[in-house]
Image (cartoon, rainbow, N blue to C red):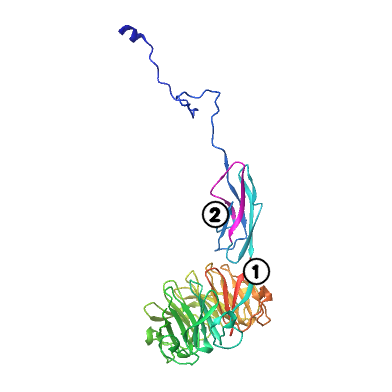
Amino acid sequence: MLAAAASAPVAAATPPDATATASDTTGTPPSSADPVESAPPTHTIGGTLAGLATHTKLVLLDNGGDALTLTANGPFSFATPLAFNTDYAVTVGTQPSWQNCSVAQGNGTATANVTSVSVSCAEAQARVSTFAGTGTAGSNDGSGTAASFNDLLAVTVDAGGNLYLADGGNNMIRKISPAGVVGTVAGSPTAGYADATGAAARFSGPAGVAVDAGGNIYVADYGNNMIRKISPAGEVSTWAGSTSPGLVDGIGTNARFNRPWSLDIDAGGNLYVLDGGNNVIRKITPAGMVTTLAGSGTQGSTDGQGTAASFGPPSSLRVGPDGNIYVADGNHLIRKITPDGIVTTLAGSTTPGFVDGTLAAARFKEPWGLAVDTSGNVYVADAGNNAIRKITPDGVVTTIAGSSTPGSADGIGAAAQFSDLVDVTADRDGDLYVVSSYLVRKITPVR
């Protein structure tokens, strides 16, 4: 028995077949006649994008999902491939700000990698409508065109889409909800100087307004030479300055201004003030320290740093998303100031005119109000030309609405009319709000 057992063959270990991928329920390897299944082929879906403006983004969808966000022109491809013989349908999910994009050759069946989808973008036309105001002087609260204003001088918008307006002729600060309901935040038609709550407070020709992330409203109180602050509860206090005009840096009420006209606030809570009577730009820190950022105090158009620069005279300022301050200058120029006070000329010439073009080749006539959107486009309320102009981050100036003909007609592009333009602001969606003496107009892209 031992000898027989020793002579029995021993089964050798057999290496697995590298091509085998399945076995039956008994553990028997498949025969060479059994087919080996493999994953079906997949194919990518893509193409080319052209015409997208800088600092904007486009969202594409494939089959209603698989969102692809594009920020630059050129080839693109969706992240999720499709199985062989699967249908695809490329559509626009979200249009870029102030552009309309369209898809060509966006539908088909994936039998190979797709690179033929063509997406092109073009500038959207501007539609102008009346948002609030009767067009005649008054002080009525109400909805839309039932409300009235008297010599509006400035407008700004908060993160919730609420508008705040300096109603200079009524010595009030007004608020308009996104639905168009107009109310009064503080002040009364009686001019004066009084810190108080709501209608008991007094202003004298408020000319500028800004709102911070906490909902506090800052007011350039032109006639009182002060910067005032309104809390979310409507309590008005004096933030900086005195009824005595001057050009004095210092803390709070120790500082002096001379007819402050426009103001805006940056992401760090610093307030920038266009000190019109002094022809300078001032800065107020969150702690209330007032300094002079730029301007010599003498009218001029000299670029330079700090007090080596000159303005003549400035009429509006806005802080851009890049932290730079943009200024509408009485020299028919749009100026730019870096946070450390270096002043340059962005666009325009000291020679007035109505010319679209790039940088110094463009012409403005009495640019008054400014807005800067989240993409860095600067919008100009070009009062002398009764038009709204746009300056791209590349310095290209175009006219988006209005013409040299004054009026108040709503319409698209050059068919719309403006007169007495004073200010413009942009909300987070890129929609614009424009104010003249008695009207608030809204400008949206035509989709």
User: In the image, what residue type sits under mark 1?
Assistant: Gln
* Circle 2: element type: strand
Q: Give the camera-side residue of 232 and 363.
A: 232
Would you name the residue on which mark 2 appears?
Answer: 67
User: In the image, what residue type sits under mark 2?
Assistant: Ala
Q: Where residue 22 appears, x then y in whole percent?
A: 49, 29
Q: Quadrant of residue 358?
A: bottom right
Q: Which contiguous range is marked in magenta?
A: 74-94
Q: Where residue 246 appears, x then y in whole percent?
A: 43, 90
Vertical comparison of 40 with 254: above or below: above
Q: In this orientation, does residue 114 appear?
A: yes
Magenta stretch contains residue 12: no
Q: Give the camera-side residue of 57 and 89.
A: 89
* Magenta segment main secondary structure: strand
Q: Residues within 10 Å of mark 2 (few under 14, many from 20)?
A: some
Which numbered disc, 2 or 1, marks the residue closer to the eye? 2
Q: Where residue 227 appears, x then y in whole percent?
A: 43, 84
